[in-house]
Amino acid sequence: MDDNYDDIINLPCETILRPRMSRYDRAAQFAPFAALTGFGAVINETSRLTEKKPELDAESAQILNERIKIIEENIRQRPEIEVMYFVPDKTKSGGSIEKFSGRVRRIDEFERELIFTDKTKINMDDVIFIQVEFFKSVRTENP
């Protein structure tokens, strides 16, 4: 079998027009090209799920208002409560529901906020549910 390149296949390469490229530079040629910078962050933000703010029915709103009133009446005891509330998302519509536990320092009627001893403030319009130990002994429905 006659091969056309047998006479030159084993010859050393004597003529180098350019200096040899380092392995690092050669590997960089084949690195992925990020033509759309920031596109990955946009995809991640779009895929992040948010929830709609739950709407309270009349009965739930009444119970919540009664519980806030009971907390206000017992504010000197600094009752420890667990609050479930809605936090609006800063970048897209919707948000998330979070829980917070702490001792209530005061209720600001003007700003409509629950203020806790650790200076956490929760807007009362975002509160969905309040649970506290002494609510079990207090009747929250209408007579």
Image (cartoon, rainbow, N blue to C red):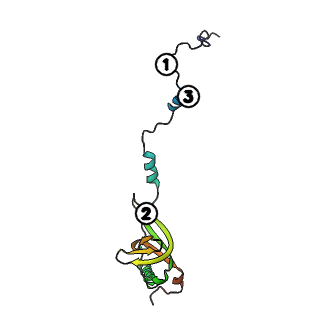
Res. 18 mark = 1
Q: Earlier in the sequence, mark 3 or mark 1?
A: 1
Image position of 105 (left or right of 27) = left
**Amino acid type assigned to the residue bearing label 3 in the image:** Arg
Q: Quadrant of residue 6?
A: top right
Mark 3 and mark 2: span between their CA atoms?
49 Å
Disc 2 crowd rating (10 Å Cα; few below 14, some 14-19, many 20+) is: some
The residue that label 3 is drawn on is 23
Disc 1 crowd rating (10 Å Cα; few below 14, some 14-19, many 20+) is: few
Is residue 54 depicted above or below 73 in this figure? above
Is residue 86 depicted above or below 37 in this figure? below
The residue that label 2 is drawn on is 95
Q: Provide the secondary structure element on which disc 1 rests.
A: loop
Q: Quadrant of residue 59?
A: bottom left
**Amino acid type assigned to the residue bearing label 2 in the image:** Gly
The quarter of the rendered structure image containing the C terminus is bottom left
- What residue occupies the far bottom of the structure in this picture? 143
Mark 2 and mark 1: span between their CA atoms?
59 Å
Q: Earlier in the sequence, mark 3 or mark 2?
A: 3
Q: Residue at x 51, y 20 (%)?
A: 19
Q: Report x, y in % for residue 141.
A: 46, 86
Q: Are marks 3 and 2 in contact (CB under 8 Å)?
A: no
Q: Mark 2 against mark 1, which lies toward the viewer?
A: 1
Disc 3 crowd rating (10 Å Cα; few below 14, some 14-19, many 20+) is: few
Q: Report x, y in % for residue 46.
A: 43, 53
**Amino acid type assigned to the residue bearing label 1 in the image:** Arg
Is residue 61 depicted above or below 89 in this figure? below
Q: Provide the secondary structure element on which disc 3 rests.
A: helix
Q: Residue at x 49, y 80 (%)?
A: 78
